[in-house]
Image: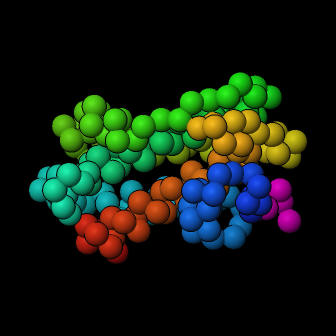
Amino acid sequence: MSFRAIRPSSTEFAPYYAPYVGQVPDGDILETLVREGLETAKRLGSLDPEQECYRYAEGKWSVRQVVGHLADAERVFAYRILRFSRGDETPLASFDENLYAETAPHDRVPLGDLLAELGWLRRSTVSLLAPLDEEMWNRGGEASKQKVSVRALAWITAGHELHHRKVLAERYGLGR
């Protein structure tokens, strides 16, 4: 079995990430990242502007904001992967996803553009991960005052997307 198919142990990430990691199917995580990124674009790519701006309840994110959040989180997770895979163990701060969503321009950006950005980011994340050897995958550091490995960050990235896709299907009635 390739080291990229080894699921991270619960000691490699904070407990609040367990639901994300648990949603990821077994197999090579790079293949999963590519497949699931394409699936998200396919499921959401044909929404009309009214659907793109839909919020299932007052104070909840629009569909555009959810996709923008996926892009923001992908950037943060990839930055952590970069730092830790290179042996930099400097503790990294958390990010406030609600602040990012409130201050980002996502609601003014067409969903197709947001999905294209997310696709570029996913290709970049996969390109960052692909050449890493097993030693680099096992490296880690501290983010949000919690220990996390490069391997776990790859699985968290995939699981985070799957989590939000499930929310979009269940609460927004989209992407089924």
The correct choice, above or below, for 103 with respect to 58 in the image is above
Q: Quadrant of residue 2?
A: bottom right
Judging from the image, the colouring scheme is rainbow
Q: Quadrant of residue 27?
A: bottom right
The correct choice, above or below, for 113 with respect to 41 in the image is above
The correct choice, above or below, for 134 with respect to 5 in the image is above
The x, y position of residue 84, in whole percent, is: 73, 33
Q: Quadrant of residue 30?
A: bottom right
The x, y position of residue 111, in whole percent, is: 26, 48
105 relative to 34 in the view: left or right: left
The x, y position of residue 53, in whole percent, is: 17, 52
Task: Identify which residue is drawn at 73% across, 60% down.
Answer: 10
The furthest residue to the front: 145
- The answer to whether residue 52 is visible is no
Query: For the N terminus, which image quadrant?
Result: bottom right
Q: Which residues are magenta?
A: 1-6
Task: Identify which residue is drawn at 46% across, 63% down.
Answer: 163
The furthest residue to the left: 50
- The answer to whether residue 69 is visible is yes
The correct choice, above or below, for 164 with respect to 108 in the image is below
Number of labels in the image equals 0
Task: Identify which residue is drawn at 34% across, 41% down.
Answer: 98
The x, y position of residue 88, in whole percent, is: 75, 25
Asked if the stretch drawn in magenta spans residue 2, the answer is yes
Query: For the C terminus, which image quadrant?
Result: bottom left
